[in-house]
Amino acid sequence: MNSQPSPPAGAALALAGLNKSFGPAQIIRDLSLTVAAGERVAIIGPNGAGKSTLFDLISGRSAPSSGQIWLAGQRIDGKKPFEINRLGLARSFQISQLFPTLSVFDNLRCAMLWRQGLGYNFWRSLASLTDTNTRTQNLMQQLQLESVAHLPAQQLSYAQQRALELGLTLASDAPVLLLDEPTAGMSRSETSQFMALIDTLTRGKTLLMVEHDMSVVFGLATKIAVLVQGQLLAFDSPEAVRNNPLVQQAYLGAVLSTAESAVALTPTLSQMGRGGEQSLRDVTSKA
Ligand SMILES: Nc1ncnc2c1ncn2[C@@H]1O[C@H](COP(=O)(O)OP(=O)(O)OP(=O)(O)O)[C@@H](O)[C@H]1O
């Protein structure tokens, strides 16, 4: 009767028949989704649609009521967050994840060490420390945070803190990343520049992001998943989702009409090119 379900071949992440209830309230309903390696998926939907709950299920923060989740072919539903992280999935946890009194460099180094399973260990070999320091330095450069390397995280600007938070997620070197509203709270120009940073630093990785800002969604995602009342209404290319009458009716129509002007004002990544990446320096170097 209960034949063991198998994951779709070659998927970076796959969800099948996922359900989550809190008491009598069913929040996620029979959700199935297959994400190919290297795909960038934006999860959108009205407030309360279940986006954060879905992230919680994938990252192990809570267990599904039923259904399966596979990461690169391995069942992960019901596993602990640190086990899922070790298996190759990292989730950004907003600024609260930062160590406020540690420097930018030490925040990143801690994340690197955790990935290696070393922690702060007095007896760690000098060679591995040197290697970690070099890789921390490289990541810090990519994040354009060298100018604030020795500042405590709590003294950074908001945009710099978000860049550091992205760095902590990247430090685990996980091939699958979950980003929770990466540009929330940023100005429009900061958002454009941060999008360019995400684009550059997550190349080749599989990305899922919950995002309300349609300029980010349509500028960055290769696929969009639309969640309404816990159900997957659509999972398709940005163009197909934009033109889907069901999506228009349930969600995007209203959102796009208010966001359209913002989208028009925000250059796409290809339009930004190197210039966009360059100007991020201005944002992240703000004291
Ligand atoms: N631990 C919980 N216990 C009971 N209900 C919960 C719990 N967590 C979430 N919910 C409910 O589940 C529903 C979906 O919440 P969720 O935060 O996943 O939505 P969301 O799409 O991320 O919303 P938003 O866009 O506003 O962040 C909401 O009605 C919320 O009240």
Image (cartoon, rainbow, N blue to C red):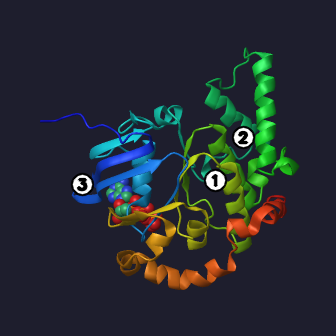
Three-letter code for the amino acid on which mark 3 is drawn: Gly
Q: Is residue 251 left or right of residue 277?
A: left
- Viewport quadrant of the N terminus: top left
Q: Is residue 162 left or right of residue 66?
A: right
Which of the two discs, 3 and 1, labels the residue nearer the N terminus?
A: 3
* In the foreground, 20 or 38: 38
Mark 3 = which residue?
23
Q: Which quadrant does ligand 1 occupy?
A: bottom left
Distance (Cα) linking label 1 and label 2: 12 Å
Relative image position of residue 165 (x, y in whole percent): 66, 50
Mark 1 = which residue?
95
Q: Is residue 285 left or right of residue 231?
A: right
Which of the two discs, 1 and 2, labels the residue nearer the N terminus?
A: 1
Three-letter code for the amino acid on which mark 2 is drawn: Asn
Give me the residue at 77% from left, 23% from top.
129
Give me the residue at 70% from left, 66% from top.
270
Secondary structure beneath label 3: loop
Query: Residue 159 occupies which quadrant of the picture?
Result: bottom right
Distance (Cα) linking label 3 and label 1: 30 Å
